[in-house]
Amino acid sequence: MTNTAHRDLRSHKKIIVASHNEGKVREIRELLRPFGFETLSAGELNLPEPEETEATFAGNARLKAKAATQATGLPALSDDSGLDVTALGGEPGIYAARWAELPKVEGGGRDFDMAMWHVHNKLGDSSDRSARFVCALCLALPNGDVRIYEGTIEGEITWPPRGDKGFGYDPVFVAKGDKLTFAEIEPKEKHAKSHRADAFTKFLADQFPDHDG
């Protein structure tokens, strides 16, 4: 990305968090807070959710960020993330949210208790519980520039779910070296080491190279 693009991001006081997921919006807002941006979410602005038709986290993140920028004329930062479980061949992967979707005849919406049960059920008695959270952040700028930043965190699946401080699959994921799930640790601790934090560190190094952390 050119220096002009860097200046373009810094010249804006507002940035769109291109997500309708309140948990993701909350985490990204917290990560952006030190930089003085006013953050607006796609949900708050009633922006339509683009259909996620790509086969990768990066591709779907790009779709969401570009759609938000084109709709608002503002920079947009999107996130596409999911849980890759080794013994399940990387599932649910990019379909992590879809595993939680309820049938429309039942009113629609998402039930991550159900999604976590599906992971547990499919794993069965497998001795390999290793898994990783993957995140792709995409920054789209009004001048057409797009950048992707990917992050991961390794860990394992535990059962039963524990904790109420996270969202999504957090209650069944224990990061490598930890004993508590992502839903049991304090949000500040999670923000410091999550897959999203890893991707965000790369975003900062690219967009704010003089940031002292």
Image (cartoon, rainbow, N blue to C red):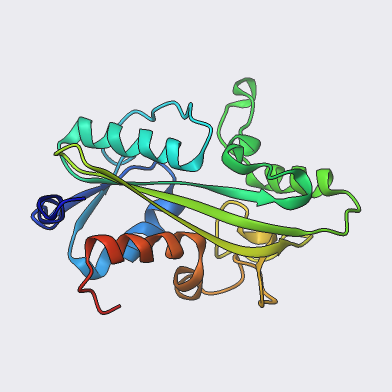
At which x and y percent is residue 76?
A: 26, 45
At which x and y percent is residue 77?
A: 30, 48
Q: Residue furthest front?
A: 2
Residue 174 lies in quadrant: bottom right
Residue 172 is at least partly visible in this image: yes
Identified at 20% across, 45% down, the residue is 75
Identified at 43% across, 52% down, the residue is 24
Identified at 88% across, 59% down, the residue is 127
Q: Residue furthest top?
A: 105
Pick the front one: 149 or 67: 149
Q: Could you tell whether 212 is left or right of 124 in the image?
A: left
Q: Could you tell whether 194 is left or right of 175 in the image?
A: left
At which x and y percent is residue 10?
A: 13, 58
Q: Could you tell whether 41 is left or right of 22 in the image?
A: left
Quarter the C terminus occupies: bottom left
- Looking at the image, is 78 positioned above or below residue 105? below
Pick the front one: 3 or 140: 3
| Total numbered badges shown on the rendered structure | 0
At which x and y percent is residue 107?
A: 58, 26
Residue 46 is at least partly visible in this image: no
Q: Could you tell whether 140 is left or right of 154 in the image?
A: left
Identified at 15% across, 36% down, the residue is 73
Q: Residue furthest right?
A: 125
